[in-house]
């Protein structure tokens, strides 16, 4: 058994020049080199731990003896030491969180569009390069980031930002666990330690408390004063923020709750990507993918849906209407159609969120795009159903 471990350890040292590795890296390495995923499990023992989630690869002597290889001069110093050793209480203050995998699952039927290629390139480079992705609701900003991480096998820590989000939520704070107060590292600190992608979702909802991330956005470490600990970002760590605005608030009132973000905060994002809605041909692939996923494929319906949405968006951008149909809402309609087997009913139920005039105009427009549906027939059928339920 020791011979096999020595063989693996020697190979690991060759592939990890720092002599240290994390559990996901060790598992990936093991499978890649023809071993089982847990072949290097002897590395992630408590005695080999050098930091949160980081383990020292043991050498041949340590594997044979089962104990860390401590130099003789260190042992002599320890024996001669007569002072009482004060234990490190920091570890006792902290909660242990063993999260084995934070790689997002691949999205079934995903179709790349917008800045997906560029986002994937940045994540693949493992360079620290914060980006700000902005665009209207339901056009795949968050999905693009998560799918890029899924395809690259990169860990992604998603934080949904609100007006209440503060340093305690992001960096960490004390929590009551089994009657004891323990410090729990927040998602930002965890992402830094693991070299993961930190996804700040809906960041324009944040207050000025988000300014605690200034050193993080500079690629520097952070000093957690509550536990007297300095956290440095591991290789691969970067930050991606998504928002419906550019951090300047919402002038048209469509995105209530968005705030004007501090200029110094925004300035730390080298680039801003303005995510559009997909082109007609791409959106049709997305809708067909949704239909296949939900189990009811209708290519003609897909073609008419994306044409209908495209006309509405053009009218919206011309300023003639105040609402539009997002790619996400098309997915909602496809799912409703799978359940109710009725095109017009699916569209009506998924547009009920709009005011009556907007909803009516949307349905009327669809009836012009699809001559096979009659909105008046739907209204008559609904009235008949209501009357049949009324005994008077």
Image: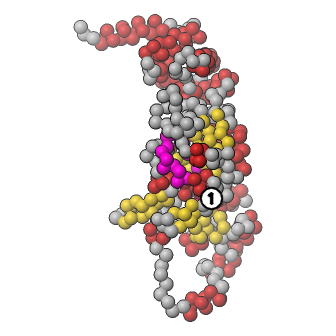
Where residue 45 appears, as percent x and y from the top left, is: 57, 70
Residue 359: x %, y % from top left: 47, 16
Q: Is residue 209 left or right of residue 235?
A: left
Q: Which residues are magenta?
A: 193-213
Q: Residue 203: x and y, percent?
A: 53, 42
User: Which quarter of the figure has residue 300?
Assistant: top right
Which is more toward the observer, 120 or 225? 225
Q: 10 Å neighbourhood of mark 1: few (<14), some, or many (≥20)?
A: few
Query: Farthest residue in the right direction?
Result: 14
The residue closer to the viewer here, 242 or 360, is 242
On the question of residue 241 being in view, the answer is yes
Horizontally, residue 13 falls left or right of residue 135, namely right
- Answer yes or no: is residue 44 visible: no
Q: Residue at x 51, y 56 (%)?
A: 171
Q: Which residue is at 64% across, 23% downward? A: 284
- In magenta stretch: residue 211: yes
- Placement of the C terminus among the 4 image quadrants: top left
Q: Is residue 96 left or right of residue 179?
A: right
Element marked by disc 1: loop
Residue identified by numbered label 1: 220
Q: Residue at x 51, y 10 (%)?
A: 364
């Amino acid at each position: 058994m020791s011979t096999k471990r020595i063989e693996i350890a020697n190979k690991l040292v060759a592939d990890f020049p720092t002599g240290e590795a994390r559990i996901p890296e060790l598992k990936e390495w093991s499978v890649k080199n023809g071993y089982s995923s847990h072949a290097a499990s002897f590395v992630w023992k408590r005695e080999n731990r050098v930091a949160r989630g980081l383990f020292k690869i043991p050498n041949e002597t340590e594997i044979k003896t089962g104990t860390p290889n401590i130099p003789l001069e260190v042992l002599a110093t320890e024996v001669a030491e007569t002072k009482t050793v004060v234990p490190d209480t920091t570890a006792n203050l902290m909660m242990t969180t063993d999260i084995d995998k934070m790689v997002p699952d691949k999205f079934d039927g995903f179709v790349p569009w917008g800045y997906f290629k560029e986002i994937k390139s940045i994540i693949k480079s493992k360079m620290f390069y914060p980006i700000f992705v902005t665009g209207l609701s339901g056009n795949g900003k968050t999905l693009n980031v998560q799918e890029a991480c899924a395809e690259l096998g990169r860990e992604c820590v998603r934080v949904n930002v609100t007006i209440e989000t503060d340093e305690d939520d992001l960096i960490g704070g004390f929590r009551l666990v089994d009657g004891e107060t323990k410090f729990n590292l927040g998602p930002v600190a965890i992402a830094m330690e693991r070299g993961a992608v930190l996804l700040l979702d809906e960041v324009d909802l944040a207050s000025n408390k988000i300014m605690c991330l200034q050193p993080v956005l500079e690629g520097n470490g952070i000093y957690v004063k509550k536990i007297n600990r300095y956290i440095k970002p591991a290789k691969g760590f970067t930050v991606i923020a998504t928002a419906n605005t550019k951090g300047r608030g919402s002038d048209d009132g469509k995105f209530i709750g968005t705030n004007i973000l501090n200029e110094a905060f925004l300035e730390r994002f080298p680039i801003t990507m303005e995510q559009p809605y997909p082109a007609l041909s791409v959106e049709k692939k997305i809708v067909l993918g949704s239909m296949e996923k939900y189990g009811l494929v209708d290519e003609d319906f897909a073609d008419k849906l994306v044409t209908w949405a495209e006309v509405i968006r053009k009218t919206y951008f011309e300023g003639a209407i105040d609402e539009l149909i997002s790619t996400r809402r098309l997915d909602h309609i496809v799912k409703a159609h799978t359940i109710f087997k009725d095109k017009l009913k699916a569209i009506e139920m998924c547009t009920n969120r709009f005011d009556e005039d907007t909803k009516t105009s949307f349905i009327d427009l669809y009836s012009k795009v699809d001559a096979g549906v009659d909105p008046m027939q739907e209204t008559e059928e609904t009235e008949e159903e209501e009357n049949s339920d009324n005994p008077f």
